[in-house]
Each structure stands twice: as C-alpha cells, then as structure tokens.
Image (spheres, rainbow, N blue to C red):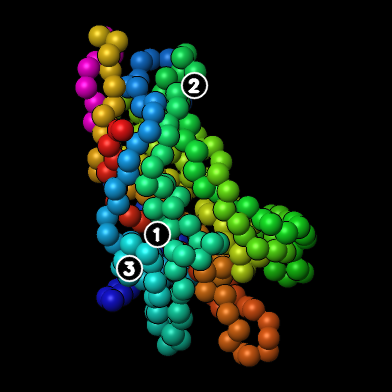
Amino acid sequence: MKITTKLGSFALLIGLPMMMGAQGDGCAASSRSPAPDVTGAWDVTYDDTIGVEVAIGGAVYDAELGAEGGVVTIDHDGQPITFDLDCARPEILCPSEAWPETITAEQRDAMFEHRMIVTLPEQRCSGALVAPAPGSCGAGTDNPGCDQVCDGEITVVETERFGVIGESGETFRLYLGAGIATNGINCALFGWSVADAELDTVGSAEGDDWQATGMSNGLVTIGYSGGCLWAGDPDDDGTVEALVLGAGVKFTTGFTAARQ
C-alpha cells in the first residue's frame, strides 16, 4: 500500500469535500422551482477502492484501501501509527455503509421539490451520555464545547437524512450528518460528511415529465475526528487510550446509481 505525505492545514482537509466530485447546491433547499423526480428505490454501485486521508498537525497522509477497509500505518515525526479502518467494525461507517447499496429517496413536499429525504445508517450510543473526563475537552480538543460523551458501545441505527437537489436539477447533495461527541475511543462523524452526485434525467420541467434515471460521478465523503479509529493500549497498563487525539481521518469513494 502506497502512502504519501503532504503539508497543509486541517482547515483545508475539512474543505476538500466541497472541492471534489459532483457538488450539490444546498442553496436550492428553499426553491419553489420544479426539480426532477427522484422518488423511489435506487441501486448504488461503488468503486472498489477507498481513499484515506489522515491529518495530524500540519501533515496530511494519503493512502488507498480495498472496499472493505483495512489497516493503514503511517510514520509521523518518526513514530509509526497504525489506523484500524476495518469496515466490519460496528463503530466505523465506511462510505458504502453510510450511503448503502440500496437506498430509497422521497420528495415529501410538493411545494419544495428540491428537498429529498433518504433513510441511512446513523451512529448511536447504546450506553449513557456522561460528562467528559476533566482535561479531555475544551479548546484545542475534538470536543471544544465539552458536550456529553458516550460511556458505552456505539451502535448503528436507521435514520432519515436531508438532501438537496441543485437548482438546475443536474446535481444533488445529501448531508450524512454528525454523530455524537467522541470520547477519544468512540467515533463521531464530522458534520460535513456528504454524498454528492450528478443526476441523469429525462423529460423536462416544462413537460411535467422530468425524471431522474441515474446518478453519475458520485463521491461519498466520510470524516472522523479524534483518536476513535486507532484507540489502543500502547503502555500495556490495561487502559484504552487514544494514540493521537489531534488527528482526523477522511474516507472517500466514488459511486454511480441506477433507478429500480
């Protein structure tokens, strides 16, 4: 597996989903203009690779994994750090899980046809939400607001997600949403995790037969914060510790979709 390194700020990493692949148009959420019909079931086909970006301080490391994920080891400041990015782990949502192989889209409001709802997996805390440990939150951490954290396992449930069809009807963006606050062991999605694609359509708005038949040039972008993906016990004291609290991980994979 090839790993490359580049310098850049984490703010740039956060901005990358907005610059890659087809981009949706969130500004169209309040539009009352016609939009293509996307309602119904869709079959999604993914690329056979997952792009991985790890950001630590000012360095960004790039790697590529198979569709099921795997292990990435980087060398940061002379220290090897291993990331267990196995998609089989229940607390990790890989792109093909956050945007599954079969999805159902709905347009529920006839006045706002650009709004779409899709039911997708979401991370939930199966334990109690408790106050974070002293010193583990605040400015400069992954939990700056000292939000409550999960003291149990992270499970995955189905939930509705909001998406927007672009004003032109040629693209869409689905907001995959943020998970719960991380405690350095459990994982939390960044709020900018999205699925973007172009819409292949037939008909027209003027003819009242405008319908989406396919999705092309799609890109799912999943961002994680904290040490959740590479927690371990480096000093063998029996306590699970996050090895690099200031890092972030981003998964990307391409996709297409066909209407059933």
Q: Identify residue type, mark 1.
A: Phe
Mark 2–mark 1 Cα distance, whole angstroms, equals 31 Å
Give the mark, 3 or 1, whose residue is nearer the N terminus. 3
Snapshot quadrant of residue 188: bottom right
Residue visible at 30% across and 73% down in the picture? 4
> How many other residues sit within 10 Å of disc 2, few (<14), some (14-19) or many (≥20)?
few
- Res. 96 visible in picture: yes
For the residue pair 102 and 23, the one nearer the viewer reads as 102
Q: Position of residue 47 (x, y in %)?
A: 27, 55
Judged from the image, the secondary structure of the residue bearing numbered disc 1 is: strand
Which mark is drawn over residue 251? Answer: 1
Q: Where is residue 93 in the image (x, y as percent from the top left)?
A: 48, 57
Mark 3–mark 1 Cα distance, whole angstroms, equals 10 Å
Give the mark, 2 or 1, whose residue is nearer the N terminus. 2
Q: Position of residue 22 (x, y in %)?
A: 29, 41
Q: Identify residue type, mark 2.
A: Arg
Which mark is drawn over residue 168? Answer: none
Give the mark, 2 or 3, whose residue is nearer the N terminus. 3
Q: In which quarter of the image is the N terminus?
A: bottom left
**Pointer 2: what residue?**
108
